[in-house]
Image (cartoon, helix red, strand yellow):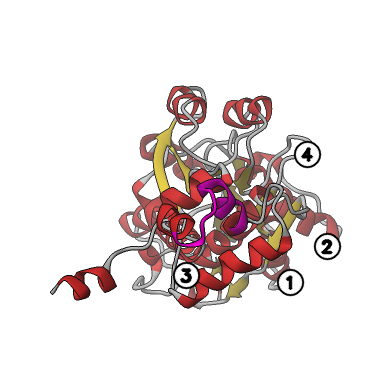
Amino acid sequence: MGESQEENKTLTIADIADALGVSKTTVSRAISGKGRIGSETRERVLKYIDAHNYTPNVIAKSLAQNKTYNLAVVMPGDYELIDLPFFQNCIMGIQEIASSFDYDMLLTVCNNADVTKLERIVHNRKVDGVILLRSFMNDVQVEYLQEKNIPFVVTGSSNYKGVVQVDNDHRAACRELTSILLMKRMKKIALIGGNEEHVVTQSRLMGFKDAFADSGTAVDESLIYMNLDNPVLLDGKLDDIIKREVDCIVCMDDAICMEVLYKLRREGISVPDQIRVASFYNSSMLETHDPSITSLDFDAKELGMLVCRTLLDMIEGQKVQKKTLLGYEVRLRESTK
């Protein structure tokens, strides 16, 4: 019975030090690869570890390497329910990569203007790095993290100099989809967007305008409607859009798109026979809609995985690309026929 317990005992740094007649500091240095230690001694320690199937636990490893093995993931406080599938998939990607490197995730929700929670996490040295899941034009979180000089990555694009960012190529995607609509002879296109403070909103707007510039067609600025996250405000603007008999309504996200589709149905306006509709995003909300909706497809899980890999490389002191853009797919469906 005693032998079985001895065999099943978890090996510690102290056990290894006692067995080899060296200090615990020496064992830690051999494991971490840092600090002054002779090559022969390091080899002795590593051979002993290998022979006894020793795996350093996270606490021991964090002490040896001066790391917490935690990452903070910051969700925006202004998210909508429609955003949740995107954030869930993105977080799944982050978690998959983080766990494969023995990291845990600390999830927090912060408003851009209030960095109190972020300050507490950073000040108490709870994490080795931070992932921001949304970027803003005037980004208080980015400014704070830059000041504290902690590794962090923005999921999305940032207009702040030197910020490492991983994003879907929203500008190129919106440019391509809008170009297709223009080639299909839809000249009078209304664009409806949300919060102009979100960098992604600006990227999508630039892509929309790029397509008009490419085709040599002037953009009708009076058909661009922004900051319409509120359904009541949106409903009023839709009355104006319908009166102006546009060829197509392009929505910057699926929450707006669903409101547009509800309104058109209430007014007895047929899609695509009387008006076409497209979305610059493709969430589960639109999957079962009849007619099917032309949209853009982005892989949120892949985005999360790449964001996490980038942050872990930064923590390890490796050079990383300042801006990485992921691809997309244009899904042409019945709503723009």
The local crowd at label 1, few if under 14, some if 14 to 19, many if 20 or more residues have their Cα within 10 Å, is few
Pointers 3 and 2 in contact (C-beta within 8 Å):
no
Q: Which residues are magenta?
A: 19-30
- Which residue lies at the image location 68% right of the left edge and 73% below the top edge? 184
Q: Position of residue 161 (x, y in %)?
A: 78, 36
- Element marked by disc 4: loop
Give the distance between the C-alpha atoms of the residues marked 2 and 1, in whole angstroms.
9 Å
Residue named by callout 2: 215
Q: Amino acid at mark 4?
A: Gly
Residue named by callout 4: 162
Along the horizontal axis of the image, is 54 left or right of 154?
left
Residue 89 appears in the picture as rendered: yes
Along the horizontal axis of the image, is 263 left or right of 118?
left
- Residue 304 magenta: no
Q: Position of residue 44 (x, y in %)?
A: 60, 67
Residue named by callout 3: 293
Q: Amino acid at mark 1?
A: Met
Residue named by callout 1: 183
